[in-house]
Image (cartoon, rainbow, N blue to C red):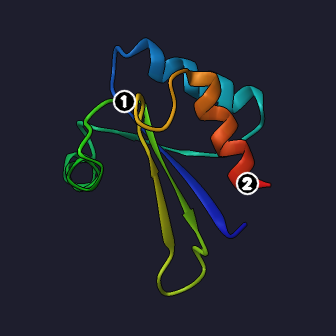
Amino acid sequence: MDKVVVVYTMKGCPYCDMIKTQLKENEIEFHERDIDEYQEEFDLFVEVTNSDYVPAFMILEDVDSEKPTPHLFTPDSHFETIEEGVEIIKKFLL
């Protein structure tokens, strides 16, 4: 697969649990990044997106190349509901 989904989550976040459940139900592989465990990585994400809301996600295209292309998505900016977020991911993976 030349695309990878990375989902930024935090403990105790019901929306984070919802997106993970829906991705699993749709059999979509993803890498979970707890924002406390991957703080430096998430800080860069926040710097680029100007949003620290979770669940947020990144879809990396061309991961086998030297320079994968990142697509960053945040709640309220790119999607309003968890279902909309999952639909974005589905469309990218087609």
Picture disc at residue 93: 2
Which residue: 68% across, 70% down? Answer: 2
Which residue: 47% across, 82% down? Answer: 67
Label 1 – label 2 distance at C-alpha: 21 Å
Q: Position of residue 49 (x, y in %)?
A: 30, 49
Is the residue under label 2 in contact with that under label 1 (CB below 8 Å)? Answer: no
Q: Is residue 88 above or below residue 58?
A: above
Position of 41 compared to 88: left or right?
Answer: left
Decide: few, some or many residues near mark 2? Use Cα within 10 Å; few <14, some 14-19, many ≥20: some
Which residue: 50% across, 19% down? Answer: 17
The residue most toward the bottom is 66
Question: Which residue does the numbered mark 1 point to in the structure image?
Answer: 54
Q: Quadrant of the N terminus?
A: bottom right
Q: Position of residue 64 (x, y in %)?
A: 60, 80
> Along the polypeptide, which appears first: circle 1 or circle 2?
1
Q: Is residue 15 above or below residue 77?
A: above
Picture disc at residue 70: none
Which residue type carries mark 2?
Leu
Q: Is residue 66 above or below residue 75?
A: below
Q: Quadrant of the C terminus?
A: bottom right
Q: Position of residue 62 (x, y in %)?
A: 61, 75
